[in-house]
Image (spheres, coloured by chain):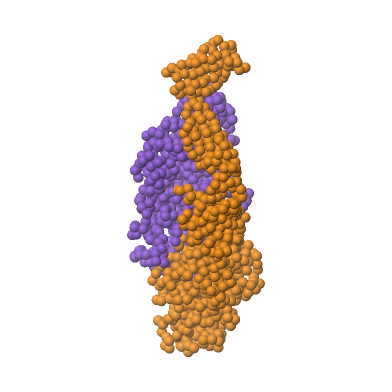
Chain colours: A orange, B purple
């Protein structure tokens, strides 16, 4: 790696920490209103209600212009005319259980889309639900969900780097049974399951099983406990849940409980953007209605649960001042047949209406009333007018946001948009300025914009890496500061306080420079962009004096090496017996030869000084016997041919000095008989020997 | 879309992490006290030897459970099963499987163009001393070649206890010296414990003492006669043979005595730079303590006479004899066997009725660990229902168990490719052109696959050949927590990542290529995969250590079968796929089956065996 590149890389890792240790990420630029740009602040939310089993659209939203045809075709289930709640528009009426829907419609808070389906409908629950969740064509099998793909599209690093500073809360929450296909991404589950927020588990997604206290139960209990504790999001979700109570109560139903949690989480400032809840039981092949009163029975009860739960949900959001932020949508895998069957039910059908609630919806009814044939037979089914993927694409573009390609990336193709969100609230580029006021409706994600929605030029502070890469010696001016920029689409000008000439960061230097020859001191580095008048970003960097070089050496006789412990620099030049080496770490092992070794360590900065050490790597002496009577044998390892032996008394006086030739046996004999009994110190010195030892003379 | 690449993370301190968790250990201990004990003894088990018993036997004797092991026991009686399980395996030899990973220049520099060809063994090759430190001498790629080879051997283990006992001995007598002496010393240690399984434990300890890795790990290599190093002298008693005080009452004087008797042995480093790998420890008489060593009453006041010159070597043999003359030695080893294979908490009555009897058998059979273990694994005590599924799986049992069960290594390779705004999911078959040769070459494939597995093990708390210390992993010995140590809030996430990638996205290998199990082959291991309820109960028995909790059962059913809970759609999906295994039919089935499989792996019950 060339040197410049190397420095460039260092800068990116540590620039923020080095130059701006106190920079909070609040200072980073992101647009608060955007859908998935963070989960730190509140923003737009979508709540999806999945109606499992195939909801009977014709008994939910009734085309009153076809009442006689309906009475003929579905006599077993058709609703009594006078009980239908008229919407007062388009000859449409609602099931009498849906009084809340009716109110929201009159308040312009309900969008109705009629006849939603897809070409060549499939009548299998499984297959059709897969198609709706994966957003695939009828003949295409895709094993990921559209919401999962949307989240992965917006968050390529999910889930390995989540939660994080910018996304402390889950991106999406499912309150139903478990991760459904809709939230299955291509390499991750994108949803968090929050069935019971006061008591979360995610890792081992399990109910509170009661285990016996036998050996096996002990392990299972322990696992359950650890799983709960290790739940990444449980703390924030639990806190949000416990922060607020719902002012209005919910029906005591499965769906009611799910939405009750959802509104508490939203009201408690959990900034999760996507929720899914579900209500099952819509597969009403029989006893869909009561014989005596078709507005009662299983379907009526389901719709009442749906109506009461959604009404309570929106009332609670109103009370919590959150309803502006939330869009709530229902869907089911299909509608039901036009013709009813003898067991007072209906069979799997095709297209059906979708309901979308929210303060910001475009309140008009989309689509024409379904056409009921005069003499309908069981094969007759409703034509779909809109593809459900048009709804998804519209939600992405008008509510959830992304780039102009996001909807196509997620849904695999382009679909014509429907007006779901009222134009005055549509903010395609997610810059916080609605399209109708936005002079620049396609600003890139994350841009800072002016009141007209046009980009105010700005770059995040972490676009730059400014770092002192080398200290300087006083008087020698060899400090270095590296400056680099991440965004390579600009040419930057760099001015340094006290330095006259200006530098530039451009593609010529890979947007990275190293300012050299700096003396000790504090420097202000101003970065501007000539093409963007008025733009300036300043950094401070300090060139300090280095610490003096310190060193310590420890000999390891057995591996014939010395370990050097060095301090003060990143690079050391080590000279051992005239051979140069460079070390990039503070610990370095150098080989030693027998005898005298000279070690000299320097650094690139002269003022750090020199560390010098002379190490003597002595050959070992072996001697026996000890205590000695007459003659001491001394064995000298290595290859020296002679050795100087000295004998000292206990008190230090030199009693003998002599040079001995070392023969092939490598053992010399030292006569000891002339010495008095006592302790003696004997030293042996040679080219590769410098050892001393003690012997006792008997 | 990028597939997630695992990170190589630093090992985790299991003990430290355990005590950070908010766990009421007292309550656990109290409930243990209240528990009734298994009273059955070592008498031969005479009850039914059915699937539950076979599974229990295999859970405890295989490294990671898999259906193929159950198949091997099909139709066998308990005695026949034990005979099969105690059949030794062959130890192979690692080969150069790293050739795709190394940068050509680095390869050339490190080996001076002298490396072996891809796929051929390298253990006997010298390597050049190019770096001044030992750490750098041991080429990381040869180290990983050895590690991946061991993991592959375990993955491919026969229905034999050999590799499980290899892990037992590695944990009991560990070294962590792979950085010293390079691939040769590492291989020597592996060979030693692999053959140690079937040899006399006593002679194994003799050989272990002189193993270069051990000479280094516990400092015998650096011991000097003026100040004999006590490290090995202590651990050979406390951990390898007679056990801990107060269980065994050896004294500090005994530690010093053994230290003196063993001073003088050292590593012969020359082997590192020559052809061949057999290491013979050197003995230096001049560095030996020739005084007489006097031992305490625990060793019957034995004296080991000091010996001069080459005769000093004999003192090691005398020390080993002395250690194994104690009753405590066989009791201690039998206790460790019991803890490893049955349950780590050993009661007084188990000590008396089981461990002491095993010790007797061990002594009567020339210190074999096989014989007492056979007795244990055939006993009423072992097959008591209360013993089943009572251990937390080690990271190795957990990870390799999932991989083996799904046979991921021999499965398919998959890759996401984005083309024309659409994401395609390609499998190696038939799109070989899209896959790098790193993963299609069968030799280097092993490198990538098992290296990833090694990373999973490390982050899960069990890096082979790098135990936390000489005592091995705390889960195997440290009372009273024992195997609970394996799981904490950090490692449980790693386990989740491991099982999630294995069951769903595939195991990351290289450059966005994931290894996935073969859906058709795996479903084919079930007797009736198109019958949802039959499949569910077969998976329950095969994968879980306890019955599927009722609420989990209905949740799983609901998530796969949907609102109507009608299993016909499942049946159709499976049949369509088996009849016409095209991409569409695969996709239609695969996310449902993965949802099913993955949810099993989310349960607490998957972690026990």
Is B520 on the left or on the right of A285, as rendered? left
Quadrant in which the N terminus of chain B is drawn: bottom left
At 48% from the left and 16% from the top, the residue drawn is A660
Q: Nearer the viewer, residue B520 or A548?
A: A548
At 50% from the left and 68% from the top, the residue drawn is A402
Residue positioned most to the bottom: A68
Is A216 on the left or on the right of B69, as rendered? right
Q: Quadrant of residue A105?
A: bottom right
Q: Is residue A101 visible?
A: no
At 52% from the left and 20% from the top, the residue drawn is A684
Rendering coords of residue A433 (x, y %): 56, 72
Q: Nearer the viewer, residue A15 or B206?
A: A15
Rendering coords of residue A679 (x, y %): 59, 16
At 37% from the left and 44% from the top, the residue drawn is B96
Rendering coords of residue A640 (x, y %): 45, 21
Rendering coords of residue B143 (x, y %): 43, 42
Q: Nearer the viewer, residue B262 or A582?
A: A582
């Amino acid at each position: 790696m060339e040197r410049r590149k190397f420095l460039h890389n260092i800068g990116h890792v540590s620039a923020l920490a080095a130059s701006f240790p106190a920079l909070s990420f609040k200072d980073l630029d992101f647009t608060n209103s955007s859908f998935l740009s963070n989960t730190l602040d509140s923003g737009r939310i979508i709540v999806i209600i999945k109606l499992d089993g195939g909801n009977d659209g014709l008994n939910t939203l009734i085309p009153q212009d076809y009442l006689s045809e309906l009475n003929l075709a579905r006599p077993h289930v058709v609703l009594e005319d006078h009980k239908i709640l008229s919407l007062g528009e388009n000859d449409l009426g609602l099931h009498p259980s849906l009084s809340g829907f009716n109110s929201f419609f009159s308040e312009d808070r309900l969008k109705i889309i009629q006849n939603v389906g897809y070409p060549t409908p499939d009548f299998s629950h499984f297959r059709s639900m897969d198609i709706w969740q994966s957003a695939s064509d009828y003949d295409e099998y895709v094993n990921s969900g559209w919401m999962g793909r949307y989240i992965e599209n917006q968050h390529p690093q999910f889930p390995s780097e989540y939660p994080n500073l910018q996304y402390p809360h889950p991106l999406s929450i499912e309150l139903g049974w478990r991760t459904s296909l809709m939230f299955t991404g291509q390499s991750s589950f994108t949803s968090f399951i929050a069935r019971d927020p006061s008591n979360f588990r995610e890792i081992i997604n399990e109910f509170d099983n009661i285990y016996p206290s036998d050996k096996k139960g002990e392990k299972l209990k322990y696992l359950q406990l650890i799983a709960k504790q290790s739940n990444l999001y449980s703390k924030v979700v639990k806190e949000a849940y416990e922060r607020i109570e719902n002012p209005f109560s919910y029906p005591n139903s499965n769906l009611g409980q799910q939405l009750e949690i959802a509104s508490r989480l939203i009201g408690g400032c959990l900034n999760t953007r996507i929720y899914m809840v579900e209500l099952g039981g819509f597969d009403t092949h029989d006893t869909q209605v009561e014989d005596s009163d078709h507005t009662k029975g299983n379907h009526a009860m389901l719709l009442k649960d749906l109506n009461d739960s959604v009404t309570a949900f929106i009332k609670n959001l109103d009370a919590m001042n959150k309803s502006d932020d939330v869009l709530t949508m229902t869907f089911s895998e299909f509608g039901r047949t036009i013709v009813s069957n003898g067991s007072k039910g209906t069979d799997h059908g095709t297209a059906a209406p979708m309901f979308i609630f929210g303060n910001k919806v475009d309140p008009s009814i989309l689509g024409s009333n379904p056409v009921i044939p005069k003499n309908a037979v069981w094969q007759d089914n409703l034509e779909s007018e809109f593809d459900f993927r048009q709804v998804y694409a519209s939600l992405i573009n008008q509510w959830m946001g992304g780039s102009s390609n996001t909807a196509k990336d997620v849904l695999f193709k382009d679909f014509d948009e429907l007006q779901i969100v009222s134009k005055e609230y549509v903010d395609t580029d997610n810059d916080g300025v609605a399209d109708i006021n936005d002079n620049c409706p396609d600003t890139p994600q994350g841009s800072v914009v002016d009141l007209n929605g046009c980009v105010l030029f700005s770059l995040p502070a972490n676009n730059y890496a400014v770092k002192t890469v080398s200290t300087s010696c006083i008087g020698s001016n060899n400090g270095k500061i590296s400056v680099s920029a991440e965004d390579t689409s600009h040419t930057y000008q760099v001015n340094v306080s006290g330095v006259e000439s200006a530098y530039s960061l451009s593609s010529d230097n890979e947007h990275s420079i190293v300012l050299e020859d700096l003396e000790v001191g504090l420097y202000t580095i101003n970065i501007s962009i000539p093409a963007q008048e008025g733009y300036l970003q300043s950094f401070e960097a300090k060139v300090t004096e280095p610490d003096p070089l310190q060193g310590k050496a420890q000999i390891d006789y057995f591996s014939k090496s010395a370990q050097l412990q060095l301090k003060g620099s990143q690079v050391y030049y080590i000279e051992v017996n005239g051979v140069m080496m460079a070390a990039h770490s503070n610990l370095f092992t150098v080989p030693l030869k027998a005898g005298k070794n000279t070690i000299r360590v320097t650094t690139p900065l002269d003022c750090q000084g020199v560390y010098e050490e002379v190490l003597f790597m002595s050959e070992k002496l072996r001697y026996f016997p000890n205590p000695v009577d007459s003659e001491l044998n001394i064995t000298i390892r290595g290859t020296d041919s002679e050795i100087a032996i000295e004998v000292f008394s206990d008190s230090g006086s030199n009693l003998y000095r002599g040079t001995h030739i070392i023969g092939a046996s490598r053992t010399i004999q030292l006569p000891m008989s002339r010495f008095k009994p006592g302790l003696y110190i004997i030293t042996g010195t040679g080219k590769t020997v410098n050892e001393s030892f003690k012997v006792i003379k008997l | 879309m990028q597939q997630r690449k695992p990170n190589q993370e630093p090992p985790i301190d299991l003990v430290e992490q355990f005590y950070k968790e908010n766990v009421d250990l007292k309550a656990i201990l109290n409930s243990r006290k209240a528990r009734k004990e298994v009273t059955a003894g070592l008498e031969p088990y005479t009850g039914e030897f059915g699937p539950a018993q076979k599974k229990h036997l295999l859970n405890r004797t295989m490294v990671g459970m898999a259906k193929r092991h159950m198949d091997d026991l099909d139709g066998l009686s308990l005695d026949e099963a034990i005979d099969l399980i105690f059949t030794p395996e062959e130890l192979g030899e690692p080969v150069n499987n790293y050739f795709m990973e190394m940068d050509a220049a680095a390869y050339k520099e490190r080996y001076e163009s002298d490396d072996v060809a891809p796929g051929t063994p390298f253990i006997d090759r010298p390597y050049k001393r190019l770096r001044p430190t030992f750490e750098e001498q041991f080429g990381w790629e040869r180290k990983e070649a050895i590690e991946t080879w061991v993991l592959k051997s375990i993955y491919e283990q026969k229905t034999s206890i050999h590799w499980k006992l290899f892990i037992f001995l590695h944990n009991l007598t560990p070294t962590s010296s792979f950085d010293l002496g390079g691939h040769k010393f590492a291989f020597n240690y592996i060979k030693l414990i692999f053959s140690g399984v079937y040899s006399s434990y006593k002679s194994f300890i003799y050989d272990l003492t002189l193993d270069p890795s051990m000479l280094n790990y516990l400092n015998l290599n650096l011991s000097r006669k003026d100040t004999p190093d006590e490290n090995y002298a202590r651990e050979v008693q406390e951990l390898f043979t007679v056990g801990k005080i107060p269980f065994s009452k050896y004294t500090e004087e005994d530690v010093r005595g053994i230290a003196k008797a063993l001073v003088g042995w050292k590593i012969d480093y020359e082997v590192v730079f020559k052809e061949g790998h057999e290491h013979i420890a050197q003995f230096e008489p001049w560095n030996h303590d020739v005084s007489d060593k006097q031992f305490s009453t625990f060793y019957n006041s034995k004296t080991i006479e000091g010996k001069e010159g080459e005769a000093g070597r004999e003192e090691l043999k005398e020390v080993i004899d002395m250690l194994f003359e104690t009753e405590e030695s066989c009791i201690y080893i039998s206790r460790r066997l019991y803890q490893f294979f049955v349950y780590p908490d050993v009661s007084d009555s188990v000590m008396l009725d089981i461990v002491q009897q095993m010790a007797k058998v061990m002594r009567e059979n020339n210190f074999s660990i096989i014989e007492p273990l056979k007795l244990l694994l055939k006993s009423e005590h072992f097959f008591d229902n209360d013993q089943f599924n009572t251990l937390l799986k080690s990271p190795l049992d957990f990870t390799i168990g999932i991989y083996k069960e799904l046979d991921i290594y021999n499965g398919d390779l998959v890759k996401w490719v984005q083309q024309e705004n659409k994401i395609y999911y390609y499998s190696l078959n038939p799109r070989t052109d899209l896959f790098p040769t790193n993963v299609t070459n069968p030799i280097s494939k092993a490198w990538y696959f098992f290296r990833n597995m090694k990373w999973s093990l490390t982050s899960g708390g069990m890096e082979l050949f790098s135990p936390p210390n000489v005592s091995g992993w705390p889960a195997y010995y440290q009372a009273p927590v024992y195997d609970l140590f394996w799981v904490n809030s950090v490692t449980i996430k790693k386990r989740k990542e491991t099982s999630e990638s294995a069951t769903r996205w595939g195991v990351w290998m290289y450059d966005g290529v994931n290894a996935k199990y073969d859906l058709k082959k795996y479903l084919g291991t079930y007797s009736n995969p198109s019958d949802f309820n039959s499949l569910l109960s077969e998976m329950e028995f095969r994968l879980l250590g306890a019955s599927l909790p009722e609420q989990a059962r209905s949740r799983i059913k609901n998530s796969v079968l949907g609102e109507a809970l009608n299993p016909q759609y499942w049946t159709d999906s499976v049949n369509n796929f088996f009849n016409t295994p095209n991409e569409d039919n695969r996709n239609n089935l695969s996310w449902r089956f993965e949802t099913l499989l993955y949810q099993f792996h989310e349960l607490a019950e998957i972690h026990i065996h």
